[in-house]
Image (tube, coloured by chain):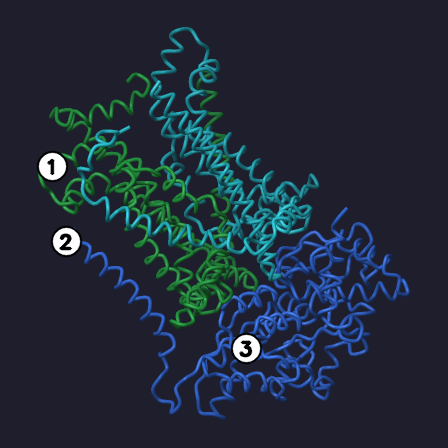
Chain colours: A blue, B cyan, C green
Amino acid sequence: MKKQSKPARIIIAALAAAIMLSSISGCGQTSASAGQSPKAPVEITNVSYDPTRELYEAYNKVFQAYWKAEADQDVTIVQSHGGSGKQARSVLEGNEADVVTLALEYDIAELEKGGLIEPGWVNEFEKNSAPYTSTIVFLVRKDNPKNIEDWDDIVVPGIEVITPDPKTSGGARWNFLAAWAFALKLYSGDEAQTTQFLKDLYTNVSVLDSGARGSTTTFVENGKGDVLLAWENEAFLSLKEHPGEFEIVTPSVSILAQPSVAIVDEVAKKRGTEEIAKAYLQHLYSDEAQKLAGENYYRPSNTAILQEFSSTFDLSLELVEIDKDFGGWEAATAKFFADDAIFDQIYEQ
Amino acid sequence: MGAFGKRGKARVIPGFGLSMGITVSMVSLIVIVPMLSILVILSGMSLADIWKAATERKVLAAYWVSLSASFIAAVVNSVFGVILAWCLVRYKFPGRRLLDGFIELPFALPTAVAGIALTTLCLPDGWIGRLFTGFGISISYTRIGITVALIFIGIPFVVRSVQPVLEKLGPECEEAAQMLGASKTRTFFKVIFPEIMPAALTGFGLAFARGLGEYGSVIFIAGNIPYKTQIVPLLIMSKLEQFNYGDAAAIALVMILFSFFILFAINLAQSKISKAEKG
Amino acid sequence: MVDKIVKCFLIVIACAFALLMLGLPLAAVATYALREGYGVFIAAITDPYALSALRLTLLTTVISVSVNTVFGLFAAWALTRFSFKGRSLLTTVMDIPFAVSPVIAGLVFILVFGRIGWAAPVLSFLNLKIVFALPGIVLATIFVTFPFVSRELIPVLNARGVAEEEAAALMGASGWKIFFRITLPHIKWALMYGVILCSARALGEFGAVSVVSGHLRGKTNTLPLHVEVLFGEFHLTAAFAVSSILMLIAILTLILKTVVEVKGKKEGASAIVELKGKNEGANAIVELNGIKEGSSV
């Protein structure tokens, strides 16, 4: 064995070189802009859900400028987007996010259960840590060829509905609950009939993508389906991207969707980014950011600024709320979305 | 083959310790230890729970969708694979080399790229989809779409298994049979077919196993509707995203057993081939 | 006459199938990539995120292919040069990555190295990050391409037998010398073929990497994942533009593979002629004849 060591050393050296190379190029990114600024540049990671891509792309620029002025420090924000549940899972499994901005309070609560986020996060920021809200609307094809006006128009046979999978998508859960609220009102509280209504609705669903953006792509780009149950912001964005091809229909009842934000305490503590993470989320409530949210078709939580966008949003829409009407996410999840709960039952038989 | 000096003799060639050491430690590090973690997760569950997770109705339906789509895809690939291999070996025609070179495209093309390309093609107004819209058949987001994607990724397996056998066989065999008065079709089915059958089976098995686990190219085209178009890999992902690691591991275990069974069947077929060869 | 018809018929079927299943997807990628003109195409492929994804993909490929090549050589040596108990078991275990869904492959690494994994305490003690970082992506890629190199080498080494190596060893040559002087020249084409296949698969791996990546833009997004991101951003054309880069790499790989195959075949054939002519290495000829004629031996 001893005399064989020379080629062995070459191989080991080559491997070592490869690993070195990788670590160098890995570091290269973070240390690229070091030098001029008195404080070392900092990097934070924001793990978000599907439709916020455009919002945070814009907001990150605003925040970078703000932080430069405020703390004289350069900040890089790394973004990640995907289905809300999927994103929460990756953070739980070790995807190191300093902040999470997810579609559901529930997904963040999972992180709290996993010990990543300290209890009480809901009250850490104003308005239950929901800096912007949204609701669920219908996106239909131009001139509304199937005459879809309300929830009961999409449960009749022959309508093809596109919505994501409530098992994995936050938006899909809001969709489901909005439909439930409508039917419950329609049948004056009869849950058996309401379940049947939801069953008819999901019978019409032809594609159940794993995230909201997947559904939008299916409907908008791939031309599948007659109606897309979508986040309001997602629907407006589709109109903007494809002018003249779609219309938004606002149903009579919908739900107040409150996407939540939180600092991932465990990660922020470890990296020493607590201060900037807090500022990053706090600044979402600034007038500037609230306007940006409105421009990206999220309903600003600041009511004064929301009024500025009254020509965009249908502010008269009746909105049910998750805490008031469904007893919070914990209860709603157990009742509707857990294994063998109502959503699973809909697909059985 | 090549069995010289292997039986019981002292090892003449050096490097046994080193090469075995590296092989075994790499296999353990990369394959065995990670795979064992599935069992670690499962060890925290009762047998009844594992059984329930692996045989839930929704899960059974997903097995069925995955198995049937990969089976059909593998059958289609076997038929066309044999024809392709036959043409590539026996006929000279313009573009033969090009065709030969491109058989491995599904290996080389990233599955995500294949996925979005196939989805776009199969949409109602896509190049392929439009041909079928007239008949009221939609391909994308149905089981047909899943099967199409699985056909794509399985193309190389049968062709590449059958090709060498045909090359070895040579045209002499058929010529001899024909000189003895056998008809062409008879020659094919009595002489050639039995020869390429084991290889075709191997290719079939590989394509089948690959199809069962395929993810990247299918997710864009699969509708993910429970009981209808939900495939097992997507279901595993869905379980994971609900933080349900136990169920995901249980389903994964069943899939691994399926694949193992298929691989085992291939090995059996292969050992039969070599036995037949040794005659 | 009938022959000709059958021939034409079969060729048409074969070509039609290949065109439909292989040609059309390629054409679709190319067409869609360029449908909004070259400007959009260039912008999409020179986007900083696309470039960093390309860099990550290439880096991952280089590391995982080198690891698998070294491993493949050692494994092929161990499995074909020696007989030992459990050899077939080892072969089967090495083939597991072929049979396991990429999703499961990603899952198992999460279960080991993730925050909830059993190796997590050790990793956090060492302040090491495996999953959702480069090492995890590399590990997942190594896993899915694990058997590629060894699988190409084993049949060639088996077919050659061990006579030459044994002779050299008896004359006192060291293991490395035997390997570099005798074995490597014979397996170099198979090795290159394996490396090419391995690289192709590593470049394009999606499922397993998608599970362990975390999708951090500019950090852990590989090129195939970037395609998915673009696909979900109303940037269909950009998605196809990036796809077309991956497609070009794939086509280059295939051309390289064909060249290697042809060269390998030629060299293999001339080697046989040489052997026969010089009447050397009777063993090898017996071997070769054995393969060729199969049942007659």
Q: Tell me the element at label 1.
A: helix
N-term mark: 2 or 3: 2
Tell me, yes or no, whether dots 3 and 1 are on the same chain. no
| Residue C87 falls left or right of residue A124 | left
Q: Which residue is mark 3?
A: A264
Q: Chain of mark 1?
A: C
Q: Say which amino acid is labelled 3.
A: Val
Q: Say which amino acid is labelled 2.
A: Lys
Q: Chain of mark 2?
A: A
Q: Residues within 10 Å of mark 1 (few under 14, many from 20)?
A: few
Q: Which residue is mark 2?
A: A2
The residues bearing labels 2 and 1 have C-alpha atoms spaced at a distance of 19 Å
- Place of residue A129 in the rendered image (x, y in percent of width and height, measured from the top left): 65, 81
Q: Tell me the element at label 2.
A: helix
Q: Which residue is mark 1?
A: C170
Please report the residue visible at 68 percent of the width from the left and 41 percent of the height from the top: B137
| Residue B1 falls left or right of residue A236 | left
Residue C31 visible at all: no
- Place of residue A191 in the rendered image (x, y in percent of width and height, measured from the top left): 85, 60
Q: Tell me the element at label 3.
A: loop
Q: Say which amino acid is labelled 1.
A: Leu
- Place of residue B16 in the rendered image (x, y in percent of width and height, measured from the top left): 23, 44
Residue C58 visible at all: yes
Q: Residues within 10 Å of mark 2 (few under 14, many from 20)?
A: few
